[in-house]
Image (cartoon, rainbow, N blue to C red):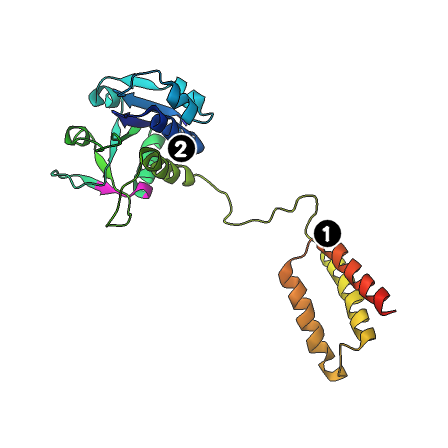
Amino acid sequence: MRGDDIILVRPQLGENIGAAARAMLNCGLTDLRIVAPRDGWPNPQAVRASSGADAVIENARICGTTEEAVAGLQRVFATTARPRDMVKAVMTPDGAAAEMRRVKADGQRCGVLFGAERMGLENDDVVLADTVIEAPLNPAYKSLNLAQAVFLVSWSWFRLADETPGSRVELGATRPATKAELLNFFARLEAALDECGFLKPPEKRPAMVRNIRNMFQRMAPTEQDLRTLHGIVAGLLKHRG
């Protein structure tokens, strides 16, 4: 998704740049800017560590300074876990992601600054940002590696537009059973239970049948499930005979 830039400021290892690119592409982000990479550019280790996110690496823009990297942006966020001696608005990754999408919808461009692996962003970098992003992590230990930090912010951005259901069942080649198929199974099962004397005494039969039917209804069986259950009933009856 173009228009939202990830900016790595003075990253040290090519492997970490590649892992960050991989995290970006996982979440649909492709615009990477790199400020003064310590080991130079291009970097073969970055390509290898990107695990196929080659387009992010190949199209990365290399900048000499943080000022150059943010020059064309209208809104800049800075990620940090350390307190800074400056007055700044602070947002969580989720709050910042929502703001980034609002900025993008207004036709503006924003970027997120991530610092070097060892010490993070310098104060002179943070002062260029409008807003600080601080993740609500364990107060006793907030250390993230570079790719983790990039993924955390990118994931917050991505999932705001994601409509994947919270859960689903993979049906493969089968399908949910119809009520007619389920009722047919009930009839066969109940006949077999009557035959073996399970549904006794007669006055308790209606409640027992309802309990059995409710049990199978809660299963939400597939057509394949019912065929298997029919086979089980048939096998039991054959064995009993």
| Residue at x 50% of width, y 43% of height | 164
Relative to residue 185, is residue 43 depicted above or below? above
176 up-or-down from 190: above or below: above
Q: Quarter of the image containing the N terminus?
A: top left
Question: Given the current orientation, which residue lies at the most extreme right position?
Answer: 241
Residue 153 placement: quadrant? top left
Q: Which mark is residue 241?
A: none
Q: Residue at x 66, y 44 (%)?
A: 172
For the C terminus, give its image quadrant: bottom right
Residue 62: give x, y in percent of width and height: 30, 17
Residue 224: which numbered mark, if any?
Answer: 1
Identify the residue at image location x=32%, y=34%. 100
Q: Contact (CB < 8 A) between labels 1 and 2? A: no
Work out how far the residue at label 1 is from the one at label 2, CA to CA, in angstroms.
39 Å
Q: Is residue 93 magenta?
A: yes
Circle 2: element type: helix
Front residue of 18/128: it is 18
Q: Amino acid at mark 1?
A: Gln
User: 10 or 162: nearer the eye?
Assistant: 10
x%, y% of residue 92? 28, 43
Q: As drawn, is 157 to the left or to the right of 197?
A: left
Mark with earlier residue (1, 2):
2
46 to the left or right of 222: left
Asked if residue 3 shows in the view, the reply is no
Which quadrant of the structure image shows residue 128? top left
Relative image position of residue 103 (x, y in whole percent): 31, 32
The type of residue carrying mark 2 is Ala
Residue closest to the eye, 87 or 98? 87
Q: Is residue 221 shown in magenta? A: no
- Residue 149 appearing in the image: yes
Q: Which mark is residue 23?
A: 2
Residue range of the region highlighted in magenta in the rendering: 90-94
